[in-house]
Amino acid sequence: MMRRDYYEILGVSKSCTDAEMKSAFRKAAMQCHPDRNPGNTEAEIQFKELNEAYQALSDSQKRAAYDRYGHAAFEHGGFGTGGDGFAASMADIFDDLFGDVMGGRRGGGRRGPARGSDLRYNLEISLEQAFHGNSASIRLPASVACEACAGSGAKAGAKPRLCPTCGGHGRVRAQQGFFAIERTCPHCHGGGEIIDDPCQACGGSGRVTRERRLSVNIPPGVEDGTRIRLGGEGEAGAKGGPAGDLYIFVSTKPHPFFRRDGADLFCGVPISMVQAALGAEVSIHTLDGIAAKVKIPEGTQSGKQFKLKNKGMPVLRSRDTGDLYIEVTVETPQSLTKRQRELLAEFEALSSTKTHPESAGFFARMKDFFENLSGQ
């Protein structure tokens, strides 16, 4: 049975941000939640699909695996979709969906230091860089902790005070008949504290946007889609919380001469009709810049491949190396002189079935085949 795409289930694109995905999930889950659709089997199935898709894509590592391998990433011992991790994920989901109605988030306290968001950076490198490995320098804008207030949001010498509206809990409760509805405090926005004298450098947020320059180590043999994690290099956390992580997604630029397939390289080389007929030796530069001799035997046909062992790409985190395949293409002469035409015509007149074994009997065989076919 064909499984539906997780992005399709959530109604988002593959390039969506975590915030966009969470918003789409909340909206869809509220509509099909079983408590709001009692006895509706279809809504229950839809709700389970939403939970499964959100659990997979809300985790950055699982999302990267799914983007590369699809549903196969979670099969045969891949990322798990059950157990304690699922229970914790479901608890977070219900907190997000129904925290305002069902009594607030677990713990009941005000929000403390929050971890910063993870960041993604797409890095395009050359095939030579992927071959040798190197250190790439990247620049990216990101939120960092404000140095002036050390991330507190308050001006130097000032301190935040407890919010008088919620008493420091970050949430307020209103009684409506038999029901108590709890929601985020509109005064402190859930922080539980009020900053009367905010830091002028960050406006009280505790974070400022800066362009940072980072060095990324590119290992030899890195492939398209490889993800490199830089811990603590993401967005700064709120209220002095820990920073998120930065994920570098590597892609390789097309090369003018080489095509990569895993650890193997392929290079198309044109040769003349005379070289193919009489044989020759051609010099090819491999990706490491070293010239290699390739012997072309006489009678070589177009499309013939010659393997140069261990001249391909290094295998990531291994001592193995792929191979380089030279594929020759026999080039037909163009813009012939009168004398060249005469020589070729003379050559054709002297040719026999041994000279062109493939083409000699081809048309006769084709004619016999279709005559026999029509006579049946």
Image (tube, grey):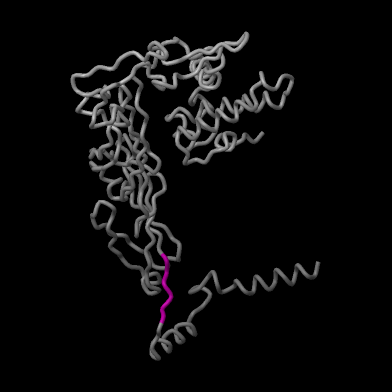
Q: Is 61 situated left or right of 39 in this image?
A: left
Residue beneath the point at 57% across and 25% down: 51
Query: Could you say where residue 92 lies in the image, as x and y percent from the top left?
Result: 49, 19
Asked if residue 332 is among those painted magenta in the image, a careful observer would answer yes
Which quadrant, please, contains the C terminus?
bottom right
Q: Is residue 118 above or below residue 323?
A: above
Residue beneath the point at 34% across and 27% down: 116
Query: Could you say where residue 322 lies in the image, as x and y percent from the top left?
Result: 35, 45
Q: Which residues are magenta?
A: 329-334
Q: Is residue 181 above or below residue 53?
A: above
> Image quadrant of residue 365?
bottom right
> Image quadrant of residue 50?
top right
Q: Is 313 situated left or right of 200 in this image?
A: right
Query: Could you say where residue 31 lies in the image, as x and y percent from the top left?
Result: 64, 28
> Image quadrant of residue 11?
top right
Asked if residue 23 is among those painted magenta in the image, a careful observer would answer no
Q: Is residue 79 above or below residue 346?
A: above
Which quadrant, please, contains the N terminus?
top right
Q: Is residue 189 above or below residue 258?
A: above
Along the line of sight, the residue nearer the viewer: 355 or 233: 233
Along the line of sight, the residue nearer the viewer: 21 or 195: 195
